[in-house]
Image: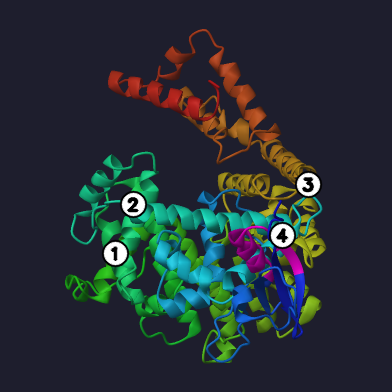
Amino acid sequence: MLRKKTLEILTLREGSWAIESAADDLEIAQKAALQFLGKPGVMGVRVLKESVGDIGNPAPGDILFEKLRSTGGADRIAVGEPSSLAPVCEDIEDLFHGGGRTTVNRLFRAYLDKNTVTATEVMHNAREMKRIMDFESMLPSAISKVAQMQSRSEDSPTMGERQNTLFGFADRLNKRAKQAESLDLPSLANVEINEAIHQINKKSNGEAPGYLFRVAASRELINVRNWWGKFAMSVDWAGACKSDPALANLDWFISDALSNASVLQDLLGDQDSLADALISLIEIADGVRSIDTEKAQDATSTEATAAKINGLFKASKLPESKLAVMERVCRQLQGSGALTKDGAEEPKVFREMLLRLIPGTELTGGPEMAEAITHRQSHIINKGGEGGLKAATASVLPALRDPGRKAGYLLSLIESDLGKDLLKDEIEQHLNGLFMTPESVHQIVRTGAPNKKMEKITSIFYRIQKSNLPDSRKAQLTQHLDELLASYVVDGKILDRLDDPNKPLHIRAFMLVSMCQPEMLPDGKASKLAREIIVKHLRRPNFETELVAQVPDEAKKEKILRDFHVQLHRSGFFN
């Protein structure tokens, strides 16, 4: 019986070749070799026929596959670094949107920029997918970086297991793109976007229509070899698109284009300072950027495209594109570049930016922006290292003034890498000082009408509830806030003033129910006090008759009763 031939997989380390593994099949051997190429210190891989001679000097015919790492140089395209917040994708679908695609963009940014192609195009076009898989050792290096990061915790898969999964994703993406190559899909350049979507939906034949739509879009965009052209074409499609699922897919293409610096530069135009540029980027993401309407009349102008995306952002149609813009703001803010030409103006300008970045309990840009704010503040106060970052955190808080904004900053920061590690204890101390130490609502919110103070504390209560703090810590903070609200209601005799018998019953009833609205008081001790009074009224035998007894107009009586039931329902009385 003939013995089955074995293929030897070799790695090149420090100038020497060594047998690393073996396989019976060439395709399996090539995949294994590429995985080895992604490991630190491996500068090349080979697949050889079963060797009987010197593996360091094989005959040319014995080398079945070989790939060497680039040794560097000015033109070398490096693999980027994945964010520690990168999600652990469980399926190839996870790579197409959200954090999965953001990670792909980060890893292959240099390659994508140089080749004028987007991540979404690559994942839906077999030719581009093959190019990136064959380019030096970039794919295995990228997979190695992600696998290493995602295998650090004890309950995570091993690095090898994660590498196998990610290489499997790449193979499945490639296979799916190859299968889509032969499909007869409408040309988005020649068929109106909504008609094209209709035709694609009819031709899905077992494949997801969204995937086929992205394949069709990629076919057009892959031939546009300038970034602004890709961006403008995608925005034109999005502006005309009437299908929400297709628009969500177009958001991915637009987001990819906005990850390229030149597109943002074209959108921004000339800026006097980094601060002006960052503020303009925030305005773009919010859809409130001022556009020259006269220039926008020219459909081919930059202003026309800017006006279209302005409207899409304002209507909240492009959530992932907004994240891409804010990610750029985050990276620039975290850097050491001066915000203004006049260094003395830097603190003032930064405070103005904080108003836009932290308008309330939510921080625009999330944990990464909170980290960027902290780093920027450390530059401003000119303190480095761990002590500088702690001092920066402490000095950001007074600049925010409002307790809701302070909560938004701290609770976002504690979700960042910096907050989870270096600043964790510092942040916990600040949270205690802001929300555990105070013995009254007045000590947290010093100015404003009673209803505004209660609304502010309630907004902080909800922000804590939705944070990533441990449940026990959330309970500790929210229970204390609820007790402060209850004391505030009782000590201030707020309910007594609202339920004044000298006022018409319908006015008293609406004011009491307003106290149980979710934005006024959270479900807890304070709202329970108001609910008890309302329930007492509702149990009166002729309550509804008495409620509108002092209203002479019959139509108005009916409206008051309807509105009152709506408010009761909104306050949870019918749940």
The residue pinned by badge 1 equals 220
Residue type at mark 3: give it: Arg
Are the residues tagged 2 and 1 within 8 Å (C-beta)?
no
At x 62% / y 80%, what residue is drawn? 68
Are the residues tagged 3 and 4 within 8 Å (C-beta)?
no
Task: Determine the CA span between mark 3 and mark 1.
Answer: 52 Å
Tell me residue 505's x, y (percent).
Answer: 48, 23
Q: Secondary structure at mark 3?
A: helix
Characterize the local packing of mark 2: few (<14), some (14-19) or many (20 or more) Cα atoms within 10 angstroms. Answer: many
At x 47% / y 54%, what residue is drawn? 175
The residue pinned by badge 2 equals 213
Kindly indicate the quadrant of the structure image that contains residue 523.
top right
Are the residues tagged 4 and 2 within 8 Å (C-beta)?
no
* Dot 1 or dot 4, earlier in sequence: 1
Q: Residue furthest front?
A: 1
* Dot 2 or dot 3, earlier in sequence: 2
Kindly indicate the quadrant of the structure image that contains residue 127.
bottom left
* Dot 4 or dot 2, earlier in sequence: 2
Residue toward you, 314 or 153: 153
Q: Secondary structure at mark 1?
A: helix
Task: Determine the CA span between mark 3 and mark 4.
Answer: 13 Å
The answer to if 34 sits in the magenta stretch is yes
Characterize the local packing of mark 3: few (<14), some (14-19) or many (20 or more) Cα atoms within 10 angstroms. Answer: some
**Where are the magenta residues, as a range?**
20-36
Q: Secondary structure at mark 4?
A: loop
Query: Is 370 left or right of 151, judged from the image as shown?
Result: left
Q: Is residue 400 visible?
A: no
Task: Determine the CA span between mark 4 and mark 2.
Answer: 39 Å
Q: Which of the labelled discs sits on residue 414, or is there none?
A: 4
Are the residues tagged 2 and 3 within 8 Å (C-beta)?
no
